[in-house]
Image (cartoon, rainbow, N blue to C red):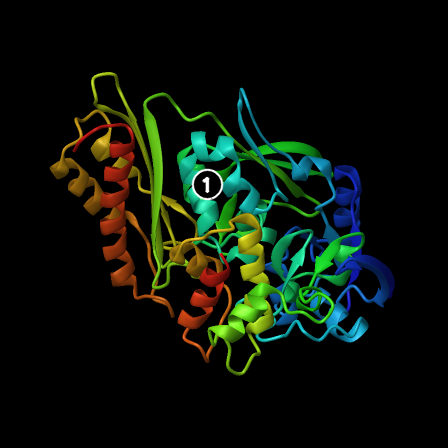
Amino acid sequence: MKRVVTLTVNGEQRQALAEPRVTLLELLRDGLGLTGSKEGCGDGNCGACTVLLNGRPVNSCLVLAVEVDGSDVFTIEGLARSGALHPLQQAFIDHGGLQCGFCTPGLVMVAYALLQENPHPTEQEVRMAIAGNLCRCTGYDKVVRAVMAVG
Amino acid sequence: MKPFEYVAAGSLAEAVSHLDSAGPAARPLAGGTDLLPQMRYFRAHPPLVVDVKRIPELRQLSCVGEGLHIGAAVPLADIAAHPDVTRLYPAIAYSCSLVGSVQIRSRATLGGNLCNAAPSADTVPGLICLGAHAVVTGPAGRREIPVEEFNTDPGKTVLGTGELLVEVVVPPPPDRSAVSYLRFTPRQEMDIAVTGVASLLKFSEGGMVYQARIVMAAVGPTHLRARRAEGVLEGQRPTAELVSRAAEEAAGECQPISDVRASADYRRHLVGVLAGRTLLKSAEAQGIRV
C-alpha cells in the first residue's frame, strides 16, 4: 500500500506517494525528479547515491522512503545557489576531480559533509571520508586535491 | 525488492506485538544496511518490517554508574564519537569506527551488527571481553543474555519470535585493565575482517596478569573465546615469551574455514599474529612493558 511521505528536500517541503519497498534514492529520482543522485551498486558499496539525511551522509539506496517521513534531505541539486556553483563543485572542475561524472554527486556530497564537520581536514581524513565512494576514472588523487583546496 | 508491509513502532510494546503477530519471518529494521541488501537480493522476504528507530529505549546512549547503555538503534557514528565511550571504552569506540564507510556508520547500529550474527562482526569481540550483556524484550517479557552467548551460528541468534534487542549494557571496565581490538583487512576502510582478535588484560597491583580475555572474530561459526590462551596468561608475569605462547595457543584454538577472503591456514596464522599484537597493546595501555 502506498503511503504519503512528507519531507524537506533542499529546504523545500515536498510530498510524494511511496510503497514501503521504494528507496529514498528511487523517491528522489523517480518521485521528485531529482536525478542528480545516482544508483551505482544499490547495496551501499559505491556511494554514488550519497545524500545528507538530517545533516549526515547516507547511502540513499539503503534507506526506505517511508523511513524519512518528516526528515530533512539535502541533495547535490541543493548545492549550487542561483546558478553559481558551490566552491566544492568548482574545485572538482578546477582540479579535474571528475571524468565521466557518475560518482561525482556522491563524492561531492560526502566531501561537503566532511567539511561541515571538519573544515580543514588532513589528506588522510579526506581519504578516509571518501573511502565509501568508488570512482573508476580519476584514481582519487584529483578528488582529494579538490577537497583539500576548499578545506 | 518484493512488496512488504512497513510499520514504525513508537514503543517496545507496539514493536513486540507487531513482530509477534507477524511471525518469525517479520524483521525489525534499525539502520537497514544489512537488511535492505538482503531484501534487494531476495535473501530475505519479510512480510512485515518493523522500524524500531523511533522507540526511545533503543535510541539512548548513556554512560552511568553501572556501565554503558547502548540502545540497539543508535548509529555506530554516534557511539564512536561519544566522549564517554572514547574515554572509558576506547576499544568499543574504535571497533565501531571500523565498520563500513562514513555513510554506513551514519545508519548502521551496534544492535544490528550483533543481531546480524556475522562471525566477522567487529563490534562484538570487545563487548565479549568486557562481559557485556544484551537486554531483550519479547512476548514473555524481558531477559538478559551475555553477548558471548547471543549468537549461535552464522546469521543465527538466541532471539525467539517476537523478541527484540533493546540495548547492550557494557559494565564499567575493571580497574587496572585495558581492552584492544585489531583486525586484518586488505583495505583500511570498507572491508570485512578476514580475522580479528580482541583482548582484555587486567593486572594485579604487582603487575601480574590477574584476568585475561581473548576473543577471536571470523575464525569460527561465532566469535570464539581463546580460553586455553587466557589460561596461559592468568597468574603470570607478562613477558614476550609468555605472550607468544598465548598467541600460539589461541591460533590452535580457532576453528577457521577457507572462503573467498582467506584460507583457513592463513586465518590461523593471522590469529597468532593479531593475538600477540593485541595483548601487547592491552598491556601497553596499562603502562606494562613486556
Quadrant of residue A78 within the rendered picture: bottom right
Q: Is residue A94 in sight in this rendering?
A: yes
Q: Tell me if residue B215 comes above or below residue B87 in the rendering.
A: below
Place of residue B235 in the rendered image (x, y in percent of width and height, measured from the top left): 22, 24
Q: Position of residue B16 (x, y in %)?
A: 75, 43
- Which residue is identified by label 1? B93
For the view shown, which residue lies furthest in the left direction? B241
Q: Position of residue B97 (x, y in %)?
A: 46, 48
Residue B56 vs residue B217, the one in the foreground: B56
Crowd around label 1: few <14 · some 14–19 · many ≥20 (10 Å): many
Q: Quadrant of the N terminus of chain A?
A: bottom right
Whether residue B252 sits left or right of residue B239 in the image: it is right
Residue A61 quadrant: bottom right
Residue B49 placed where, x, y %?
74, 56
Residue type at tag 1: Ala
Nearest the eye: B63 or B30 = B63
- Residue at the spot x=30%, y=66% of the render? B263
In the image: residue B114, left or right of residue B193? right
Residue B91 is left or right of residue A62, and the answer is left
